[in-house]
Each structure stands twice: as C-alpha cells, then as structure tokens.
Image (tube, grey):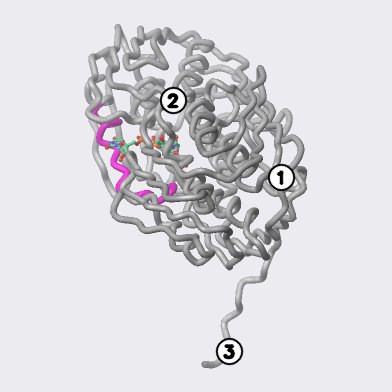
Amino acid sequence: MEKFVIQGGTPLMGEVSISGAKNAAVAILPATILAADVCVVENLPAISDVLVSLRILSALGARVRMLNKNCYEIDTTHIRCAAVPDDLSRQMRASYYFLGALLGRFGSAQVAMPGGCDLGPRPIDQHLKAFTALGASDSVEYGRIHVESDRLRGAHVFFDTVSVGATMNAMLSAVRAEGQTVLENVAKEPHIVDLANFLNMMGADVRGAGTDCIKIRGVKAMHGCTYSIIPDQIEAGSFMVAAAMTGGNVLIRNVIPKHLEPITAKLELAGATVEEFDDAVRVYRNGDLLPLKIKTMPHPGFPTDMQPLMTVLLTIARGTSIITEGIWENRFRYVDELVRMGANIQVDGQVAVIEGVPELLAAPLRASDLRAGAALVVAALSASGTSEIEEIAHIERGYENLVGKLQGLGANVRRISVPAPSMPQAL
Ligand code: EPZ
C-alpha cells in the first residue's frame, strides 16, 4: 500500500511544468485505431490512465513503442480484434472511447461497462444515442456493451445533455461514416478541440469543435500523423490553487492561459494574483483569501474537476462561500475528510456552504477519487502538522510525478510504501 506523507505549512515557490491533458490523451489514443497506420503521440502524460489505454491498444493487436516517457509510436495496422479485455476496460472510465473508435474502423466493438471515479450515476445513454443515429445497434450482455453496424451513415444528433464523453465518442465513429454528421448541443472543452485537431491531422473532416455544433464529413480512409497533446487544464489549475492556498509564488509553465480563464477569474476574485504570459501563468497571493460563490458548469463555465480544489481553498477564506455542483450528483464525498482537518462545511445535496476557518490541521486522510485526492494533497500542504493520504492510486491516475513536482516547489512531501497488514494466525 502506498501513501503520501505531507508536512504542511511551507509556501510553494519556484517553477513547475504541466504535463499533457489526461482527458485529451484518453480519447486520442483510441482514435489512433481509425487509421491502419502509424501515429506518433507526443506530450502524453505518464499516468496510469494513459498506461491502461496503451495496454488496451496492445491487447487489440497494435504495436506500441515508447520513444520517450511522454511519446509513443502506435502502429494500428494489424489490429484485428474489436473486443477490449474486460479487466482493462474496467480500470478506467475512458475505455468507452474504444467503442467509438473500433466502431468507426471495424463496424463493431465490445467494451465492458467502464470503471473510473465514483461521482454518482454515470450513464452512457447519449453515447448510444449517437451510435444508433449513425446506424449501429447496441446490446448489453454479461456486463459488456456491444455496438455493431454494417454501414455507418452520417446523421443529425441533438444531445439531450452536454456530455464530453458522448461528444467525443460520436466524433470518433462519425469521422468514418458515409456522408455528413451534425452534432448539436455538444461539449466545448479544450480536449474536444484537441481531439478534432488530431482527427483532422489523420485526414478527417471535422469542423466547429469548440462551439455548440460540430459538423463532420465522413472520409473513406484516414492516415497516421505526429501530434502533440495540449497541456492539462486541471493539473495547471491544481497547482494554481496550491500556490494561492499556501501563500506561495509559482510560475506554472507549459499551459495555454486561455484554457485557464474560468479558473483564473475565480482565483483573482478570491484575492490571488494571476499574471499571464504566452505559455505560462504566475500565481501568488499577498492578502487574505476572500469568499466566493461558484457553480460548476460545462466549458467555458467553471470546471467540475476543479470543484474539490476550490472547496479546499475556500476553507480558509475570510467569510462564507457557496459552491454548487452542476454536473455530478455525488461530488462532495471528500468533505468529511476536510471536516476532520477542522474545516467548517455543510453539504445539502448539490450545495456546499463553507465558513472560513483560520487554518486547517493535519489528519490521516483517504482519497475517494482523483480530484478529491488532489484537493486533499493541497489541503495537507497548507495544514499545520503532518498528514498522511491513503488510496493514492486515484491521484496517480491523473497527475504525472506529483510528488517530484511538489518537491521541486519546496514542499515536504514523500511517497512511502507500507506493507499490507498480515492476517493474524488466530483470533
Ligand atoms: C468527462 O467525464 C471527464 N472524464 C470528467 O473528468 C469530467 O468530470 C467530465 O467530463 C465533465 O467535465 C474524462 O474525460 C475521461 P460527461 P464524462 O459525459 O465524459 C451526464 C476527472 O476528474 N451524462 O460530460 O464521463 C452525466 O451523468 C474526470 O478527470 C448523461 O446523462 O462526463 C453528467 O451529469 C472525472 N448521459 C453530465 O452528463 C450520458 O450519456 C456530464 O458528463 C453521458 C453523460
């Protein structure tokens, strides 16, 4: 069992470089299947969700070669199998992107019901709605989703809800369908645009990504390419919050400041200073933290994946903050951990009311999901005393070398292995 041990109270100082975007990488890797050719994908974050995606590609018959720890060459020429092994698909939510990509190339795909963070119900009805509109049938058998079509045909899809996953899955299948597909009420996150750019580099014809309506003209064949993934908006936001929370001064490099605007705007209202450069932001704070009202929304609204981090920041703001979760039904489970650190937070359904306290106190903590785990790390960095965080596998799904990056900023953080408790011989 691995843990983080964090002695808090040191302001973060220095520079940190942001890795490639997880939520772009986990869609772009399956997208390499759409051409029977070789793609080189650069700026891949070295995180476990990427490793699982590469293992799935390899299990399907792709030749996967590491060029360096953030760059892989993927040859999908000899893929013959369209069934993702169950044990791998259950390891992450994003395995559902193999449905769209395999359907696009082979007209058939089988993926076990995906795993991932438990944030409440995570239906995939909108993904299936898009596949059905394109002419595929779907069925669920023994926990596996099976989609199939003799011939995918372009269609008009109006999504009932704005979904990142359904938008990307529809794009993955529609690029190889016959004729034009129009996707309306789509998600507009930076990773949607990144996937569209990657698909276009492979010879697809995708227009409008980043707006409410995406138009795709299907192509008969696609080809390999070399592509570099955008920086991770949420990893950058996490370091921005950590700098503001600890009263530090951090230059966060390799970012696209435009992607950070929803986060920057709230941090400035909370009393932090954010200086923007071409591909970096500097975050620091001189005065007290101020309370905020935030509601999470699809991009360009405030991102739900930053919600736990902002809650942590506001635990020590001077006054009462209100955070409303607008995307997921169950994304406040980490609040109990913060309360054990001395935070004053009341949760009622989708709303958290946070009364600022002067400081957080160290405690033994447990990460319940990826962003909740990152938020606990930030809480521990600011708290007085030494905290230990368990269940860090959740955090390592989405943050490359978090301990090394924090140590580079002067934080007192260690990752330790503790032997699992052995069963007693007799009770
Ligand atoms: C993606 O999840 C991200 N994951 C999540 O990040 C992120 O929280 C979420 O988008 C919202 O930004 C990946 O990209 C791998 P959605 P996704 O489909 O695609 C409802 C992280 O921490 N919905 O946009 O699964 C759904 O219940 C992770 O990095 C349907 O009703 O999210 C939710 O309320 C956690 N039917 C809302 O839409 C569907 O078919 C948004 O979900 C699909 C979704």
Neighbourhood count class around disc 1 (C-alpha, 10 Å): few under 14, some 14–19, many 20 upward? many
Q: Does residue 283 appear in this view?
A: yes
When asked about the image quadrant of residue 204, the answer is top left
| Residue under label 2 | 189
Disc with the residue nearer the chain's start (1 vs 2): 1
| Residue 345 screen position, x and y as percent | 41, 58
The image quadrant in which ligand 1 is located? top left
| Residue under label 3 | 425
| Residue under label 1 | 12
Query: Ligand 1 near label 3 (Cβ, under 8 Å)?
Result: no
40 left or right, relative to 204 = right
| Residue 418 screen position, x and y as percent | 67, 68
Query: Ligand 1 near label 2 (Cβ, under 8 Å)?
Result: yes
- Which residues, given as a range, are shown in magenta? 116-129
In the rendered image, residue 117 lying in the magenta stretch gets the answer: yes
Q: Does residue 29 appear in this view?
A: no
* Dot in front, 3 or 1: 1
Give the amino acid at mark 2.
Answer: Glu
Please name the residue shown 42% across and 39% down the image. Answer: 304
Please name the residue shown 42% across and 7% down the image. Answer: 205
In the rendered image, residue 28 lying in the magenta stretch gets the answer: no
When asked about the image quadrant of residue 409, the answer is top right
In the image, 142 versus 298, the foreground residue is: 298
In this rendering, the answer to whether 258 lies above or below 418 is above
Image quarter in which the N terminus is found: bottom right
